[in-house]
Amino acid sequence: MTKASRGRDHGDLILRLRGISKQFGAITALEDIELDVHAGEVVALVGDNGAGKSTLVKTLAGVHQPTAGSIQYLGKPVTLDTPGKALEMGIATVFQDLSLCENLDVVANLFLGHELNPWRLNEVQMEVRAWTLLQELAARIPSVREPIASLSGGQRQTVAIARSLLLDPHIIMLDEPTAALGVAQTAEVLNLIERVRDRGHGVILISHNMEDVRAVADRIVVLRLGRNNGVFTPDNTHEELVAAITGATENSVSRRTARILETQGG
């Protein structure tokens, strides 16, 4: 998908954060955060370690409650006081550890905890629904009866994302979905993110990989030291993004990049 096509109008506003702050004792992890997410939009959340990304994600996932600020979801003020409530409302999170059971197959992992008719499992219906969803996502999974232990890193990420879609969420948060993946597997996951966006879901992507971010994000929200430090698009330069993330000037980033290239060339 090209940058131009990503510049299209997005759907309705799903999520709006205003003045979100979070303190842990004397430590301020987030201060006055603002964030909007629309349907059919990928919003990348970037920043150095300690910038507040994880705290913000856990706040939206219902793990942490904000010290101050407001959360509007589907046009109404809400309180996300438990992970179960966030998920029930339609905010799904795929954490970096994926939480997959390697000894179970794809179908069992997709429906784990949300089995159809738990008193008497409807294996056929679950298998059909699993295949349908994976085909809609053009997922490269050889069989829904394949054990998770035999899948690649990209395929496991696909299963984790597909599992979150079964509950038909409005927003999916992905925590470093391409970390430790090879080039081919990364491309597979990035294509999957685009298909999720095209289904009309809002996607919040947390990543340190600027190439991956620029490949799929519609907007790039930079956090620095627990505060907003700019909203960018893939059309912004690498130097502009790095400067916002690190607090350096664009000129110093450009000079440092040039020195690295000269050293590599020598």
Image (cartoon, rainbow, N blue to C red):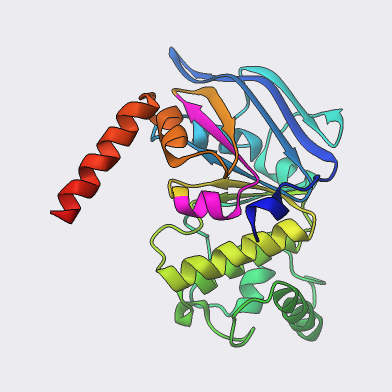
Q: Residue 204 location in percent, x, y?
A: 63, 45
* Picture quadrant where residue 120 is located: bottom right
Relative side of 30 to 115, left or right: left
Q: Residue 173 location in percent, x, y?
A: 62, 48
At x 44%, y 23%, the residue is 225
Relative to 229, say whether 210 is above or below.
Answer: below
Relative to 89, say whether 240 is above or below.
Answer: above
Relative side of 41 to 212, left or right: right
**Could you tell me which quadrant the N terminus lies in?**
bottom right
At x 59%, y 80%, the residue is 140
The magenta-colored residue range is 211-224
* Picture quadrant where residue 196 is located: bottom right
| Extreme residue toward the top, this view | 26
At x 54%, y 38%, the residue is 236
At x 74%, y 82%, the residue is 127
Q: Residue 8 location in percent, x, y?
A: 77, 48
Can the viewer see residue 134 in this picture? yes
**Could you tell me which quadrant the C terminus lies in?**
bottom left
Can the viewer see residue 153 in this picture? no
Q: Is residue 193 magenta?
A: no
Q: Residue 75 location in percent, x, y?
A: 87, 31
Relative to 100, say whether 174 is above or below.
Answer: above
Relative side of 91 to 229, left or right: right
